[in-house]
Amino acid sequence: MNKVRVAAVLLMISLCLLIIYGIDVSLAGVASSAVESQESGFFLPLSASTRGSVFGGGAVIMSIIAFAIARNAFSIAIPVLLFVNGGLIITGMAVLIAQGALAASSAAATGTALRTISFTIATGGILVGLAVWKVITNAKIVEGKKTPLSSTSSSKIRILVVDDEPDILLTLNAVLSRHGHYVKTFDNPEKALSHLTSNNNGVITPHYDLVITDYRMPGSNMSGLDLAKRVKEYNTRTGRKTKVFLMSGSFNESSLPEEFIQALKSGIVNKFIQKPIPNDKLIAIVEYNYYK
């Protein structure tokens, strides 16, 4: 499961916790009793403050973890879910909790309500702020860096990108294209290989200088390493020199599997790229390792 999906799952769980808490508060009749005097919830035999800590605190912690996980990945769902969670905390939990506290006539209960409102709004505001930050991050990922091409890259590289995750394809396409390179993307290695080696009525597909492919693509019968081997065979057969960079988020350069190491040594794979990778580092790796 990729990082965006993990983050989305955490945010959905967070949202469910907030919804359950809201239902619990409503059914327990908090609207007619003070927060601190509420003996038990509808679902859990805990005080109102304890339930707020369990559900609300858990939701906020998971939301922040989700943001951290998907911070450098392009995703529309993450900022939307963050905004929904934050908004629900502000408009829902604050109202429900405050109603019960304000129902009591004591100054202590009123003070508790005001503190609760302030804390809840601040907490929800943090999640809304993270949502805005994620939107800005998404924009930067799509736009890519505006730095000029390196002095060695006088001509654009023709790049074939293969990955089963749409977000990664979108990000790589945006970043590489922004730096002047021609990019063609595929979410299936078999289709990518067919495109690379096709010969329609004697007209061969335009040459690609580089193939950047993910290592594991569960939805396909061909792995990124299998694709690299087929590209190597294609090079041998046609005399072309298409390079292959293999990406993976499952391991780093110090923990590569043996088959990966052998592929690097034999030249089947020219470079390993660890995911996720910053935009500027990706460009540096692609241009340096291609032109050297």
Image: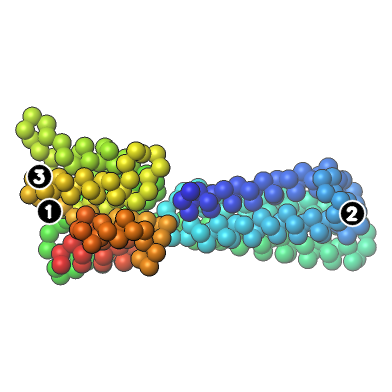
Residue occupied by mark 2: 38
Q: What is the three-letter code of the residue carrying label 3? A: Arg
Q: Quadrant of the C terminus?
A: bottom left
Q: In the picture, residue 187 is in which quadrant?
A: top left
Image depth: mark 2 or mark 1 in front: 1
Q: What is the three-letter code of the residue carrying label 1? A: Lys
Identify the residue at horizontal 36%, vertical 61% (top origin).
256
Residue occupied by mark 3: 237
Residue occupied by mark 1: 241
Q: Secondary structure at mark 2?
A: loop
Q: What is the three-letter code of the residue carrying label 2? A: Gln
Identify the residue at horizontal 78%, vertical 66% (top origin).
115
Q: Residue 58, image x and y in percent?
A: 68, 57
Label 2 crowd (10 A; few <14 / some 14-19 / many >=20): some
Residue 25 in view in this figure: yes
Image depth: mark 1 or mark 3 in front: 3
